[in-house]
Amino acid sequence: MNHGRSNVGAPHEPDLPPYQVVLSDTDWGSLETPFGNGEDLPEVLTRLLTPDPWVQANALSELGEMVGHQNTIYEATAPAALYVAGILAHPAATTPRPYRNVPIRAALLNWLASTVYDASDEIVGRTERYFPGFLAPGTIVAAFRDLRPMLYRAVSPFLRDSHKDVREAAVVAALILAEHPTLTEHRDHLAAHARAILDTSGDEPNRRAARKALEAWGHEAPAPEPLVEEPWAWGPHSDGRGDLEPPF
């Protein structure tokens, strides 16, 4: 994996630490998860790099439960997200998923999109109304949100990927990450990708994410199709797991 490659269009974002370093240098056992600590996470994360697509998919599904249960950001979520972002360019990310000729990279990007949505402006703003101080400096969620420029740098090379599913998943993740104030320079560029989703995608959660980004950034967006939705269904792949469960 080439960690030093240039990323045209995103010159100011910090480089992601190598995934091997994230895995070895993180004190997983000291980090909170919904089920205790994260001592089992290294084994789960390592399985994402196996050549067996069933093993990869099951590991990603387990990861969603272990660091994002009930759409919550835990202490272990940040290093897990850094690891997933770090393996996007790994050869194992090109393994086709069972039953579909879609690289597992698309599922990794969808997982990242769902995870960062749980710390998006929309979600934290809503939560802050009921839990003041939820986003105070030094909190778990605030620290996770600080990683968005770094995660964006890992995601952005796939905005023009040759595979539609990978490309669309990267765009949705990038749209959410670009809420970070240091990434405003990318929004006009990303707006073109958002319009492409609205023009070509049949995935309604992705279309909603594209439309919301355009509206938030002051761009014209086509009127949404009539849809009855619950408030918790506003994010991309908002259950965080539906794209990952066998049999796909």
Image (cartoon, grey):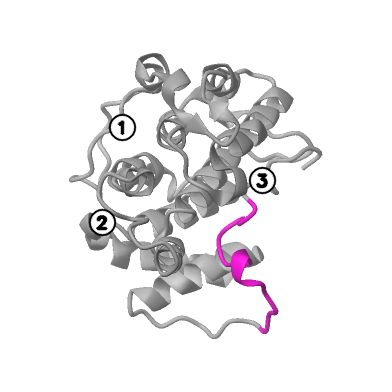
Q: Residues within 10 Å of mark 1 (few under 14, many from 20)?
A: many
Residue 101 image position (x, y, % from top left): 70, 39
Callout 3, which amino acid?
Arg
Residue extending furthest toward the left: 12
* Residue at 56% over, 47% down: 110
Magenta-highlighted residues: 226-239
Q: Of 180 and 219, which appears nearest the observer? A: 180
The image shows residue 2, relative to residue 96, as above or below, that is: above
Q: Earlier in the sequence, mark 1 or mark 2?
A: 1
Q: Where residue 47 sits in the image (x, y, percent)?
A: 60, 19
At 21% from the left and 55% from the top, the residue drawn is 182
Please identify the quadrant where the C terminus is shown: top right
- Name the residue tied to disc 3: 241
Front residue of 88/176: it is 176
What is the secondary structure assignment of the residue under circle 1? loop
Q: Tell me: 202 left or right of 138.
A: right
Read off the residue under disc 1.
16
- Amino acid type of the residue that numbered disc 1 sits on in the rendered structure: Leu
Q: Which mark is residue 183?
A: 2
Q: How many marks are shown on the rendered structure?
A: 3
Q: Return the disc, 2 or 3, that comes first in the chain's sequence.
A: 2
Do callouts 2 and 3 mark residues in contact (Cβ within 8 Å)? no
Q: Is residue 191 left or right of residue 41?
A: left
Location of residue 194 by image quarter: bottom left
Name which of mark 1 and mark 3 comes first in the sequence. Answer: 1
- Label 1 vs label 3: CA separation? 25 Å
Residue 25 versus residue 98 in the image, above or below: above
Quadrant assignment, res 205: bottom right
